[in-house]
Image (cartoon, rainbow, N blue to C red):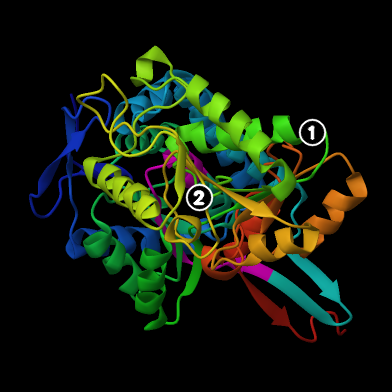
Amino acid sequence: MRDVLQFYIGGSWVDPLTSNIIPVVDPATEGVVGHVSLGSAADVDLAVRAARGAFSSWSRVSWSERLFLLEAISEEFRRRYDDVADAILSEMGAPLSLAKGAQTAIGLHHLEATIAALRAYRFSELRRDTLIVREPIGVCALITPWNWPINQIACKVAPAIAAGCTMVLKPSEIAPFSAVVWTEIMHAAGVPAGVFNLVNGEGSVVGEALASHPGVAMVSFTGSTGAGVQVAQIAARTVKRVHQELGGKSPHIILDDESLPAAVVRSVDGIALNAGQNCNAPTRMLVPRARLAEALLVAKQRAEALTVGAPRSDPDVGPVISGAHWGRIQELILGAIQDGATVVTGGPGKPENFDRGYFVKPTIFAGVTNEMTIAREEVFGPVLVVVAYDDLDDAVQIANDTPFGLAAYVSGEDTDTIRFIAAQLQAGQVNLNGAPVDYTAPFGGFKQSGNGREWGDHAIAEFLETKAVLGFATP
C-alpha cells in the first residue's frame, strides 16, 4: 500500500491545508493500492509563492550550474530506476517489460537529450548593434497525464530546469506514485528549495488554480483536447503562455508493395502498446482497396496472437487505466457497430476469463468510413480502424481529414514516394517505415493536437522569453 498524503513545496514535504483523500486503484485487479491527497487552490498558492521566491536567484544561475544539476538528476534517476518502474506498474498497470523498458527509460532519454541540448544552446546573440537575449519566462505550471507519467514529467521538468525556470507540477491523481519517486529524485539531486514543487489534485481544482494564478507565467499541459481548451480559456484571463500537447487520431498510410504485411503488423503492435493509451498511436490504418482483404487477414492474425493479462505476467496488452475509461471505450466500440462498422476481431466486453480488471479486447474494425465516430474520435484503447483508399491522393485526403494532427505514419518501399506523402501530411511528427524514436526531434501537434513543441532544444525554447537590447554594441 502506497499513500501519497503530502505535497512537496519549498524543498520540503508538507501536509495539505485541507484533508481530501481518495483511493488509488490498480487497474489490473480493481483493488485499492494506495491513497492520494487532493490539493486545493490554497495549496497551489503556497507552491506558486515558493516557486516565485526561488525564481529571482535560480533564473540567474550560470549555464554550467543548470547543466550540473541536470546531470545530478540523471544520475539519481539511474539509481532509482527500478523504483520508478515499480511505481508505474502499480499505478497504471503497464506490463512489466513496458514499465521497466520504455515507460521508465524514456525519462532517462529526455534527461540525456536535454543535457545535450543545453550544452549547445545559445541564450544570446549579437545582431548588428542589438543583443538578442533569451531569458527564463518565470514560474511554470506543469500539468501531466497518467498514460506516460514519467515521459511527460521529464520532458517538461528537464527543459524548464535548463531554461532557468521554477515550477509547480500537478501530475494525474489517478497515477501519482511515479511522480513522488521523481520528486524524491529531484530532492536527492540537490534541486534548490522552491525551484521544483509538487501539488497533487484534480484538474478541475488544482489545474484550474494553476492556470488562473497571476503568479504563473506559463502553463504546459498534456491531456485531452477538451481539457486543453479549458486550460487555455482560463489562462487567457492573465495572458499566460500556454503550451499544449493534446489528442490525436493518427493515420498510417501503407503503400501497395511487398512491405504491406510487415507494415500492417506494425500498426497492430502500435495500438497494442500501452493498451493503446498513446496520443500518437497509429489508430487509422489506410490500405489500398485492392489489398484490403489481405491487410485485414494479417491484422486479424496479429491481433489474435497478442496476449492480454496482468502486468507482472508481462503480456502484450495490459489493462486500461480505470473503470470509467473502460466504459468509454466500450461505448465507442458499440457505437461503431451501430454505425455499420464490421468487427474483424475483438469487440465489446472483456476478454474471456477476465472477471476483474479493466481489460479491453484488442479490436479491429473494417467497413469504416472517415465520417464514422470511431474514425474521428480518440479512443485511447487497443482499437484499430482499417480504411481503404483508391490512390495516393485519396490516401492523403483521408489522412488529413481529421481535427487532429499530432502524428502520422507512412510505410512503403519507394523512398521518393513516402517522402512525397510525408510532405503533404498535416502532422507534427511523421514516421517513415517504423523509424526509431528520436528524443532530439520536436514533438507536438498541428490543429487541435496542440501548440508548441517538446523534446530537445525545441523544448528549452518553449520556456524562454526573448528580449532585444538595442544599442548594446554601440561604443
Residue 359 is situated, as x and y percent measured from the top left of the image, at 31, 31
> Circle 2 — which element?
loop
Name the N-terminal-most of marks 1 and 2.
1
Q: Amino acid at mark 1?
A: Ser
Q: Position of residue 43 (x, y in %)?
A: 21, 58
Q: Which residue is at the front of the view, 33 or 126?
A: 33
| Residue at the image position 54 percent from the left and 60 percent from the top | 59
Location of residue 233 (image quadrant): bottom left
Q: Check disc 2 and give the amino acid type.
A: Cys
Q: Quadrant of residue 467?
A: bottom right
Q: Quadrant of the N terminus?
A: top left
Residue at (36% x, 20% y) in the render: 309
Gap in angstroms between the C-alphas marked 1 and 2: 25 Å
User: Which residue occupies the foreground of this view, 115 or 339?
Assistant: 339
The magenta segment is: 134-154
- Residue identifier under label 1: 259
Based on the picture, tell me whether residue 145 belongs to the magenta stretch.
yes
Q: Look at the picture and state if 79 lies above or below 39.
A: above
Quadrant the C terminus occupies: bottom right
Q: Residue at x 72, y 58 (%)?
A: 395
| Residue at position x 60%, y 54% in the image | 454
Q: Is residue 300 magenta?
A: no
Q: Position of residue 470 (x, y in %)?
A: 76, 86
Q: Residue furthest left?
A: 19
Pointer 1 local density, CA inside 10 Å: few below 14, some 14–19, many at least 20: some
Question: Mark 1 falls on what kind of element?
Answer: loop
Find disc 2 in the rendering and name its residue: 279
